[in-house]
Image (cartoon, grey):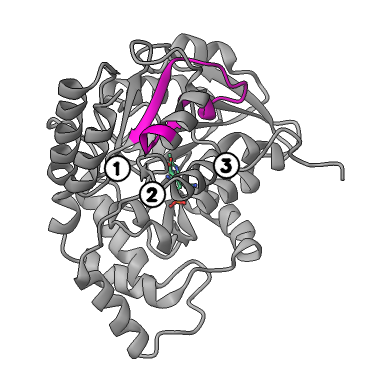
Amino acid sequence: IQSKLPKVGTTIFTVMSALATEKNAVNLGQGFPDFACDPLLVDAVDQAMREGLNQYPPMAGVLPLREAVAAKIEALHGKRYSAQDEITITAGATQAILTAILAIVRPGDEVIVLEPCYDSYIPNIELAGGTVVRVPLVPGTFRPDFDKIAAAMTPRTRAILVNSPHNPSATIWSAADMQRLEDLLAPTDVFLISDEVYEHMVYDGRAHESAARFPGLAARAFVVSSFGKTYHVTGWKVGVVAAPAALTAEFRKVHQFNVFTVNTPVQHGLARYMAEPGRYLALPAFYQAKRDLFREGLQAKTRFKLLPSEGSFFQCVDISAVSELPEAEFCQWLTTEIGVAAIPLSAFYADSFDQRVVRFCYAKEDATLRTALDRLAKL
Ligand code: PMP
Ligand code: GLN
């Protein structure tokens, strides 16, 4: 058939996880934790189910969860969103991003993405009939190049997608970066989709600079996050989008006919669990210890050249000193022969090209990371 997405195959995360399972490899590819979530969170969902909270929730999500999110954003970023009119619960960040794009992008509109980027963004824009305008992050450092972004903007630019902490590069945007984005967008009516799913995974004392903190950005932004990432429950597929009322109204027009709403007891369970802020405030230290364990092991045992990991739960490495294989083939080989799965950076570019860089996910039990390091030591 004539495909709407002729260049799209199966997402790399599915491909590499299937290969990891088949080869019995340690899966440091797809980004998900291999440890259990807090049993208290499971109890909270269980309790909600037993209370009979099992029918359709309101279209925008259950109010207690929307209120909990609004309170959290206000406490962390000083911006008050209306739980009623400006917060919507989604089936993961993936659906939030697609729905935001479908809600605002009209055929022929240009949408700027900064490459490398998460693999759903570009097909999402194409599905909406938009024109993808790809702007590279600075090669090597993966920092935003604001001159290039400015040069890519035209009167047809409808939106820009940004992601910090960044998947796959593990860089984070500083307050100065966000300020420059705010200044750049100020004279325009360009919308911002700010993918902040790794908002609680920032290390070495850095802060997460949410678009919600910058009034000129918040006024035009869909701020997207994921409960799956924050609470170690990626399989629950629950996310959230915060956006000004006018944007939220457009978002919900699409959302209601896309998924309509998201499962009820999980939302109530999350709302009750989130009431204790210590549960997300503990995350940076928790993940930083894993990052340090993994980085120290890689440094001591392998010849990979490590890139910084300032945030997210990813570690990118340059493979040049270890292998001459193109990075995509290297990942296949590493999974099959060494028993460790990784993701090639080329998967995050529309025109995949070899950079000699692969991405590992360190959201794993320390024992899993040690097993992977022992295997990688054989390289
Ligand atoms: N954006 C980024 C940058 C991601 O890494 C991910 C998931 N790994 C998502 C969005 C999707 O999140 P969810 O699982 O909540 O759909
Ligand atoms: N976002 C996760 C990653 O980058 C995977 C999510 C998915 O499998 N779609 O690994």
Is the residue marked 1 within 8 Å of ligand 1, measured from its CB? Answer: no
Q: Relative to 373, is 180 above or below?
A: above
Residue sitting nearer the eye, 257 or 87: 257
- Which mark is nearer the camera, 1 or 3? 3
Q: Pointer 3: what residue?
A: 11
Residue 273 in the image: state x and y as whole percent.
23, 68
Residue 105 in sight in this render:
yes
Who's the residue at 61% across and 65% down the image?
Answer: 256
Q: How many marks?
A: 3
Amino acid tagged 1: Glu
Residue 52 in the image: state x and y as whole percent.
39, 90
Pick whichever of labels 2 and 1 is earlier in the sequence. 1
Determine contact: label 2, label 1, CB under 8 Å: yes
Dot 3: what SS?
Answer: loop
Amino acid tagged 2: Ser
The image's mark for residue 199 is: 1
- Which mark is nearer the camera, 3 or 2? 3
Dot 2: what SS?
Answer: strand
The quadrant the C terminus occupies is: top left
Pick whichever of labels 3 and 2 is earlier in the sequence. 3
The answer to if 239 sits in the magenta stretch is: no
The quadrant the N terminus occupies is: top right
Residue sitting nearer the eye, 186 or 209: 209
Residue 99 in the image: state x and y as whole percent.
58, 51
Q: Relative to 187, is 247 above or below?
A: below
Compute the Cα span from label 1 to label 3: 24 Å
Is the residue marked 3 within 8 Å of ligand 2, measured from its CB? Answer: yes
Question: The magenta stretch spans which residues?
Answer: 337-360
User: In the image, is 183 to the left or to the right of 112?
Assistant: left
Q: Pointer 2: what residue?
A: 225
